[in-house]
Amino acid sequence: DVQLQASGGGLVQPGGSLRLSCAASGFRFDDYAIGWFRQAPGKEREGVSCISSSGGSIYYVDDVKGRFTISRDNAKNTVYLQMNSLKPEDTAVYYCATVFIATLVWGPPANAYWGQGTLVTVSS
């Protein structure tokens, strides 16, 4: 079975850090670009960051640039999202998914694999 398992969420104070993991199984992980998305209560899902299959291309949404770092370990079939300097507005359920990356645009295709989500709450 194809699985993407997101983990690492939790409650953290503003300014704190968390590292999310997205562990994949059931498909050729190193053939796929992977993206992180988030959905805050009452808001639409938004793309946060993505990394190409080789790790050579990386993109971030503007409001996480300089604070979040995406990486991948193809030997472990895992993508990471290191989140530093967290703000209350980063509070959301974070999901990982397979994505396509094209010039100036990236996102999940119709047949994307999705993880189940992990909740990040930034609050004092």
Image (cartoon, helix red, strand yellow):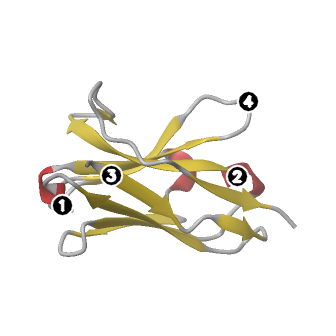
Residue drawn at the location 25% of the way across and 49% of the way down: 1
* Cα separation between marks 2 and 4: 12 Å
* Cα separation between marks 1 and 2: 28 Å
Q: Which residue is mark 1?
A: 56
Query: Front-most of 94 and 90?
Result: 94
* Cα separation between marks 3 and 2: 24 Å
Question: Measured from the top left, where is residue 16 in percent x and y?
Answer: 69, 74
Which SS class for mark 4? loop
* Cα separation between marks 4 and 3: 27 Å
Amino acid under disc 2? Thr
Which SS class for mark 1? loop
Looking at marks 1 and 2 on the same chain, the residue that comes earlier in the sequence is marked by 1
Q: Which residue is mark 2?
A: 91
Q: Quadrant of the rendered structure where residue 76 is? A: bottom left
Residue drawn at the location 14% of the way across and 61% of the way down: 54
Looking at marks 2 and 4 on the same chain, the residue that comes earlier in the sequence is marked by 4
Question: Measured from the top left, where is residue 30 in percent x and y?
Answer: 14, 59
Which SS class for mark 2? loop
Number of residues whose C-alpha sits closer than 10 Å to that of mark 1, classed few (under 14), some (14–19) or many (20 or more): few
Q: Quadrant of the rendered structure where residue 72 is? A: bottom left
Looking at marks 4 and 3 on the same chain, the residue that comes earlier in the sequence is marked by 3
Disc 4 vs disc 1: which is toward the camera?
4
* Cα separation between marks 1 and 3: 24 Å
Number of residues whose C-alpha sits closer than 10 Å to that of mark 3, classed few (under 14), some (14–19) or many (20 or more): some
Residue drawn at the location 72% of the way across and 49% of the way down: 89
Q: Which residue is mark 4?
A: 42
* Cα separation between marks 4 and 1: 34 Å
Q: Which residue is mark 3?
A: 3
Number of residues whose C-alpha sits closer than 10 Å to that of mark 4, classed few (under 14), some (14–19) or many (20 or more): few
Q: Quadrant of the C terminus?
A: bottom right
Q: Is residue 69 left or right of residue 90?
A: left
Question: Measured from the top left, where is residue 43 in percent x and y?
Answer: 67, 30
